Amino acid sequence: MSATATPAPTVVTGLGITAPNGLGTEEYWKATLTGTSGLTTVSRFDVSSYPSTVAGEISGYVAEDHIPSRLLPQTDHMTRLALTATDWAIADAGLDPETLPEYGIGVVTSASGGAVEFGQRELQNLWSQGKEYVSAYQSFAWFYAVNTGQISIRHKMRGPSGVLLTEQAGGLDALGQARRHIRKGCPAVVAGGVDAMLCPWGWVPQIASGLLSTDPDPATAYAPLSSGARGYVPGEGGAILITEDAASARSRGAAQIYGEIAGYAATLDPPPGSPRPPGLRRAAENALADAGLTPADIDVVFADASGVPALDRAEADVLTGLFGPGGVPVTAPKTLTGRLLAGGAALDAATALLSLRDGVIPPTATTGTPLPGLDLVVGAPRETAPRTALLLARGHGGFNAALVLRKAA
């Protein structure tokens, strides 16, 4: 491709979702539109001695129904969810990896810290029983790149692959990286993120951040972008998306095209004490410029929605600065799932594509008054036939990402 040529569009042709309020794309989407929450008091382990007790747990998932028996001993709950979501996404796209060149499909996922539940169990075996009781699979099953590796191996995907460790921003970063690979000639890339940190080893570091909600009521614990904000609620799950070169997708007769990845940008916040402003607005502006759009072209914003009052106010300032007070509908469906760490932004992307497909904006579940200046979609979906969506995500440590999705022509 010459330096002046227009890059081929990158489109999404398949979705696979594992979320606290729904397993599978349509089950999740129905729950989201009806306001069905997956937030609950943690049952995976005893949280009675912890200050935070609410999370988005996936219920009804039986690994043996989805994962080959040979893989069960070497995979964490997180990786099993990722493999299941990938299977669903590939089936949804009608993609047969064997019909593409040997190195024609890549894999890019996001991660926050690895498979901590597997790691905790094996370390407990080490401390309590000795090294002879530690699984040999501990050498890789905990690793932050394990989802990418296991997906690649299972489906013989030998194309360009990688993993992005930018926490909640990672899902958007993975999609941005997938688009880069496709623009360089790779026909298809499996991209997204799935995370699971609901064990003591994953729970304690989040409490130590001081950002978790300590409200014990699942109905009010997570109320971002509103007067009820008191911290975030974590969850597990995420989404895997099949991204393809648009021409390649159409030539193979893709069953559907959910939308186009029209723009992407990422920034880092400046160091504490720096006079430079946080980077979220720059990420949004750069993603819009990358898409060749202006704020007036955006029909809906899927917000990062941290739930931390100061961070929510900063995001609201970015949105009112870009769009003007009440200038664009804003939503945060993650209020029904919690923040899924490395899986959260990928799930937002899948949700936004379903929103574009069906012409409806899903609501935000909140019990507080929306922050001034925000046209927060609450209570019920809005049937406004959106054609463009801006997604914002921030990862702990100063990571920012923005993605523009456009409805397929």
Image (cartoon, rainbow, N blue to C red):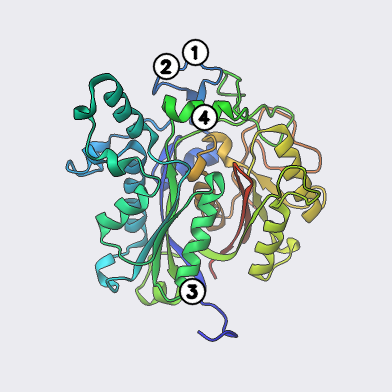
Which three-letter amino acid code belongs to the residue tagged 1?
A: Ser
Is tag 4's residue or tag 1's residue first in the polypeptide sequence? 1
Q: Position of residue 47 (x, y in %)?
A: 46, 17
Q: Taking 261 as reference, is 67 above or below it?
A: above
Q: Is mark 3 on a helix, strand or loop?
A: helix
Q: Taking 2 as reference, is 53 above or below it?
A: above
Q: Name the residue under label 1.
A: 49
- Residue pushed farthest top? 49
Q: Which of marks 2 and 4 is in front?
A: 4
Q: What element carries label 4?
A: helix
- Marks 4 and 1: CB-CB under 8 Å? no
Residue 205 circle label? 4
Which three-letter amino acid code belongs to the residue tagged 3?
A: Arg
Is tag 3's residue or tag 4's residue first in the polypeptide sequence? 3
Q: Mark 3 points at which residue?
A: 183
Q: In which quarter of the image is residue 373?
A: top right
Q: What's the CA distance linking mark 2 and mark 1? A: 8 Å
Q: In which quarter of the image is residue 73?
A: top left
